[in-house]
Amino acid sequence: MDPLSDVLSLLKPRSQFYAGFDAAGDWSFDFPPHDGIKFTAIMRGACWGVTDDLEQPIRFEEGDCFLLNSRRRFVLSSDPALLPADSEHILDAAAREGVAVHNGGGEVFLISGRFEFSGNHAAVLFDALPPLINIPRASGQAEVLRWSLDQLAAELRTPQPGGTLMSTHLVHLMLVQVLRLFMNTSSELPKGWFLALADRQISPAIGAMHAEPARHWTLEELARIAGISRTVFAQRFKALVGSTAMEYLARWRMLMAADRLRASSDNVASIAFSLGYESESSFSTAFKRIMACSPTQYRRQLSA
């Protein structure tokens, strides 16, 4: 798989909540911080949104969508000058009925999904994302996303057999598509993993490490894949990712190891050898340095 698929598969995203909001008139609601990533699309009308990280509210038009990063309080409104009300009854109605209706609805219609992650290291994704990703309707390569939005809106409005499974897969598809659009269209990617994946020289090297994590990679080999000199590769990798290529490889190996410790009964030695370590002790030392506990302690904590 490619690096984005690798990370999302390792973190095992699950859509905990997806629903619609149909509103009219004046309204403003304060949504509390949430775990995971929240996705929202404006299917009809327009509205405003703001988080504590933004100096000014953002206006969302029909066809726009956005991702809200983990643990961010968010105010959504018809007018940013309005005093926000508590959103609990809106969330309750959406969870109970699929679509929450306010003031009779008919002017603004939103659909939202929230993803939580069963993997214990979702920071690899969250830390690489800004507080809010706005994908305007005018963004290119958005046909699949628009189709998915229309299908999900239909599932919410007219429930059918198999609708829960259909909606879950559609929301997962939208998550991947929004992250793709973010990498391909944003002119201000923050320093980190997504910036590196969007780089035509560093991205192939990251893909190679993900494809063969057990290989004894050298900077020379990775630089050759990137098509640049060893020195330029090392400098560019650290400038984009924030760590050296060898540090990135070691962390990726430990994330894979942590997943196997959690999800399988494989012993520590077999996990170590499968990831390119020549001894269990060298693997355990690397695991403890990066994960702050030994492999045995990590597995024991999960079963406690």
Image: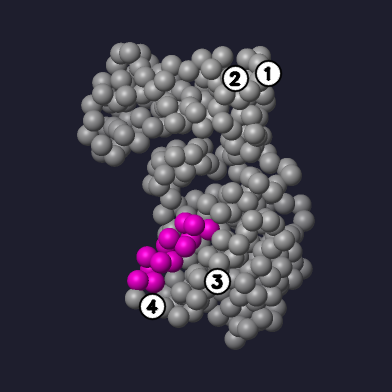
Q: CA distance from mark 1 to mark 4?
A: 56 Å
Q: CA distance from mark 3 to mark 1?
A: 45 Å
Amino acid type, mark 1? Val
Q: Position of residue 215 (x, y in %)?
A: 41, 20
| Magenta-drawn segment | 162-174
Q: Residue 160 has which mark?
A: 4
Amino acid type, mark 3? Asp
Please tell me whether mark 1 sits on a helix, a strand or a loop: helix
Judged by depth in the image, the label closer to the viewer, 4 or 2, is 2
Residue 273's image quarter?
top left
Q: Considering only vertical position in the picture, is 258 above or below 281?
A: below
Q: Residues within 10 Å of mark 3 (few under 14, many from 20)?
A: few
Q: CA distance from mark 3 to mark 4?
A: 15 Å
The answer to whether residue 199 is left or right of residue 225 is right
What residue is shown with label 1?
232
Please tell me whether mark 2 sits on a helix, a strand or a loop: helix
Amino acid type, mark 2? Ala
Which of marks 2 and 1 precedes in the sequence? 2
Q: Residue 223 has which mark?
A: 2
What residue is shown with label 3?
150
Callout 1–callout 2 Cβ contact below 8 Å: yes
Q: CA distance from mark 1 to mark 2?
A: 8 Å
Which of marks 1 and 3 precedes in the sequence? 3
Tell me which residue sits at (38%, 32%) in the image.
Answer: 256
Judged by depth in the image, the label closer to the viewer, 1 or 4, is 1
Q: Is residue 164 magenta?
A: yes
Which of marks 2 and 4 precedes in the sequence? 4
